[in-house]
């Protein structure tokens, strides 16, 4: 009987922690605003994979929020002209400097691809543009890949994914579990990059809006 009570208490504790964690995760996704929107950075980094991300990155670039724009996870057939043609504003895009990353097919690889480019450029600050539901995991990955680099979040809401849409909550729940799994990997498991090389242990940082 005592074992059953202890097991029940353990399950209830686990469920409570899971629910509290998901509530915090959802609150961050839904309410976190762009951090210091007037602040300029060395570069704007856009992670592809959802509507409005590239448009928002181009808008920030056009309004001179950084001198460089890096878009990670671009399909191999997409060119710079394809992306700049999406920009339909009277505010012109800068003539320089837009860079496309073609290697990444996952969030972890987005972080690796971005890290390689940022280190090559010797930048110390970036503005990260991705979907609001995707921001927490992306930020965790980039903090791990780029210790010492200041990261300003810029969450984007996908047009067809508002809080009244059940698909948003399904996606958010999936993203929550991916984030928990990846956090456990970063804390406890040997770390390797997609190319097989070893990486350093992360410095865990608090997520700040």
Image (spheres, rainbow, N blue to C red):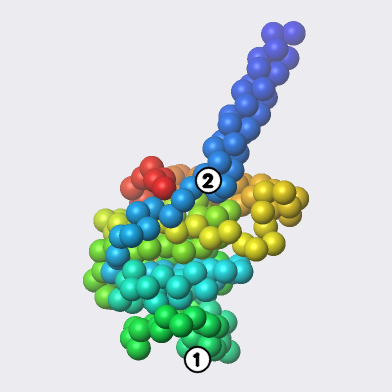
Q: Is mark 1 on a helix, strand or loop?
A: helix
**Image point 66% across, 29% down: which residue?**
15
Q: Is residue 71 left or right of residue 13?
A: left
Asked if residue 16 is positioned above or below residue 88 in the image, the reply reads: above
- Disc 1 and disc 2 in contact, CB within 8 angstroms: no
From the top left corner, tell me how far across and down residue 17 is, in percent: 58, 29
The answer to whether residue 171 shows anywhere in this view is no
Asked if residue 83 is positioned above or below residue 18 in the image, the reply reads: below
Which label was assigned to residue 69? Answer: none
Instruction: Count all numbered tags in the image, as a single digit.
Output: 2
Q: Nearer the viewer, residue 181 or 107?
A: 107
Asked if residue 4 is positioned above or below residue 165 in the image, the reply reads: above
Disc on the earlier residue, 1 or 2: 2
The answer to whether residue 138 shows anywhere in this view is yes
**Image point 33% across, 48% down: which residue?**
203
Asked if residue 122 is positioned above or below residue 140 in the image, the reply reads: below
**Quadrant of the image occupied by residue 12:** top right
Residue topped by disc 2: 31
Q: In this view, does 209 lie to the left or right of 29?
A: left
Location of the N terminus (image quadrant): top right
**Image point 52% across, 73% down: which residue?**
54
Instruction: Point out the residue furthest to the top here.
Output: 1
**Quadrant of the image occupied by residue 100:** bottom left
Q: Nearer the viewer, residue 189 or 111?
A: 111
Label 2: few (<14), some (14–19) or many (≥20) C-alpha neighbours in 10 Å:
few
From the top left corner, tell me how far across and down residue 185 is, in percent: 49, 49
Q: In this view, does 84 lie to the left or right of 164?
A: left
From the top left corner, tell me how far across and down residue 191 is, in percent: 43, 56
Q: Nearer the viewer, residue 189 or 150?
A: 150
Q: How far apart are marks 1 and 2 (CA)?
A: 34 Å
**Image point 25% across, 64% down: which residue?**
124
Residue topped by disc 1: 81
């Amino acid at each position: 009987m005592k074992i059953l009570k202890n097991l029940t208490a353990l399950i209830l504790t686990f469920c409570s922690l899971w629910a509290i964690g998901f509530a915090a995760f959802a609150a961050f996704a839904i309410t976190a605003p762009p951090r210091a929107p007037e602040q300029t950075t060395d570069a704007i980094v856009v992670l592809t994979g959802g509507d409005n991300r590239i448009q928002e990155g181009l808008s920030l670039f056009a309004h001179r929020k950084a001198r460089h724009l890096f878009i990670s996870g671009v399909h191999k057939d997409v060119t710079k002209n394809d992306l700049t043609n999406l920009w339909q504003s009277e505010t012109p895009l800068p003539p320089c400097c837009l860079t496309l990353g073609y290697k990444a097919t996952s969030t972890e690889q987005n972080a690796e691809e971005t890290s390689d480019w940022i280190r090559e450029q010797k930048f110390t600050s970036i503005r990260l543009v991705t979907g609001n539901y995707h921001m927490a995991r992306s930020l965790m990955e980039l903090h791990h890949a780029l210790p010492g680099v200041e990261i300003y979040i810029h969450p984007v809401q996908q047009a067809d994914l508002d809080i009244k849409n059940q698909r948003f909550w399904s996606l958010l729940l999936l993203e929550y579990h991916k984030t928990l799994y990846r956090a456990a990997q970063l804390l406890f498991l040997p770390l390797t990059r997609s190319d097989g090389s070893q990486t350093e242990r992360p410095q865990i940082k608090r997520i700040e809006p």
